[in-house]
Each structure stands twice: as C-alpha cells, then as structure tokens.
Image (cartoon, rainbow, N blue to C red):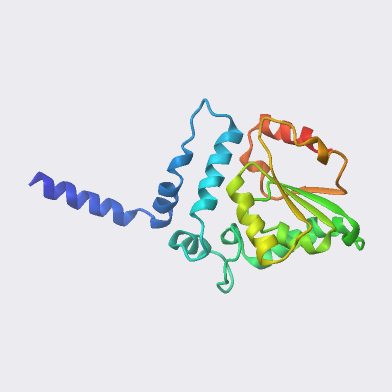
C-alpha cells in the first residue's frame, strides 16, 4: 500500500539527488543562516564547519575535486578541491606573485581570508613575514597545520579576526603587500566596507 509507495518515492528521490550536495548540506547544518545573524557570523560558522569536516580522504571532498580538469592530484590543503593546480598557479602568477617582485624575501605580506592556506603556502617562501587573517578559527588551525607543522614556515602568523571589530592595531602599517583571493564574494557590502577600512 501507501507505505510501500512512500518508500519507493523516497528511494527514487534519493537516487536523483547528488550525493556530493547532500553530504555538503548535511555537514553544514550547523551553519544555518538566520536573518538576524551578521554576514561575518554566518561565514565564521560555515567555514568552521567546512574545515572541521574536511579531509583529503573524505568522499565529499573527493567528489568535489573530481570535476577539476587534468589528472587527479593529492589534496594537501583545505580548498585544493576548488580549482586545478595549473589554473591557480596561472592566476597567482598573473596577479599576486609579481607584486612580491625580486625582493620578495624582504617583504611583509598579509592575506585577508586565508582559509586553509592554499594560497598562503605558495606565498610563504617568497616573503619574510606573512600574516594570515580569517574569521574562522578552524580554517586558521588547518592553515597552521599545513604551513607551520608540515611545511616548516615559522615566519607565518595566524590571526583570527572578528567581522565587526577592527583588526588588531599591532598590524597597522605593517605590510608591504595585502592580498585576498576569492574571499570578498562571501561578504555583504557592509562587511566588505569594514574589511577594506581595516587595511592600511
């Protein structure tokens, strides 16, 4: 009867849904967006949950990376599943690395929204000091594991920032280069204005 029909419809529905999307939604339930939460608070929750659930061997991460062009590769860093290596290197080579110039070893740089460190790990060896700013403590922990523990970049610092507070004063006028990669798309206009106002 009715119970069998409902079970059959539920099974068909599950078959037609993307397992990757279902897994991502399930892992991000703690990040439910509430209209009374500021944008930065939603982002903090979202990226904390993403970093906590991330693992290079996780099925949902592997499925996300399976759409990338080129040969499959080892995912070493949170975010490696978002773009192929050659495209990332091309963008960084065109837009960021030239800012570091020949004297990159003498420069101090800051990354706004460093996430798990996928861009920072490509910059760290080219600067004397790198500070990674992010609203997500879990993303910063992942970046620190990768950059400091695994790659030995002791000159990299990790600073959590609150979306509604100024960046710590100790960083004012500290950097030769400040960059951000694929971060401002996650901010509302108020958050963008606030973040840009903190960069000096």
Q: Closer to the camera, 89 or 113?
A: 113
Point out the residue furthest to the top here. 36
Q: Quadrant of the C terminus?
A: top right
Q: What residue is at 68 percent from the left and 39 percent from the top?
A: 161
Point out the residue furthest to the left here. 1
Q: Closer to the camera, 57 or 73?
A: 57
When the figure is inspected, residue 58 is found, relative to residue 29, above or below; the finding is below
Q: Quadrant of residue 147?
A: bottom right
Residue 139, percent from left and from top? 60, 50
Q: What residue is at 60 percent from the left and 57 percent from the top?
A: 79
Q: Is 107 left, or right, of 37 in this rendering?
A: right
Q: Is 123 left, or right, of 9 in this rendering?
A: right
Residue 6, percent from left and from top? 17, 46
Q: How many marks?
A: 0
Residue 180, percent from left and from top? 73, 48
Q: What residue is at 59 percent from the left and 33 percent from the top?
A: 39
Q: Quadrant of residue 128?
A: bottom right
Residue 131, percent from left and from top? 76, 50
Q: Quadrant of residue 41?
A: top right
């Amino acid at each position: 009867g009715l119970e069998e029909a409902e079970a059959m419809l539920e099974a068909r529905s599950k078959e037609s849904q993307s397992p990757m999307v279902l897994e991502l939604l399930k892992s991000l339930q703690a990040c439910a967006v509430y209209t009374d939460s500021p944008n930065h608070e939603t982002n903090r929750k979202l990226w904390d949950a993403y970093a906590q659930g991330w693992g290079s061997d996780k099925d949902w991460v592997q499925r996300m990376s399976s759409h990338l062009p080129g040969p499959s590769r080892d995912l070493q860093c949170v975010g490696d599943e978002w773009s192929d290596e050659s495209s990332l290197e091309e963008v960084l080579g065109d837009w960021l690395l030239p800012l570091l110039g020949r004297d990159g070893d003498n420069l101090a740089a800051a990354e706004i929204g460093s996430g798990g460190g996928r861009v920072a790990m490509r910059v760290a060896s080219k600067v004397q000091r790198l500070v990674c700013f992010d609203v997500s403590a879990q993303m910063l922990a992942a970046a620190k594991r990768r950059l400091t523990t695994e790659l030995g970049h002791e000159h990299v610092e990790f600073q959590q920032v609150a979306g509604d507070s100024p960046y710590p004063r100790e960083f004012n006028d500290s950097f030769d280069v400040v960059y951000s990669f694929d971060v401002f798309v996650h901010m509302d206009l108020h958050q963008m204005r606030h973040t840009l106002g903190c960069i000096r």
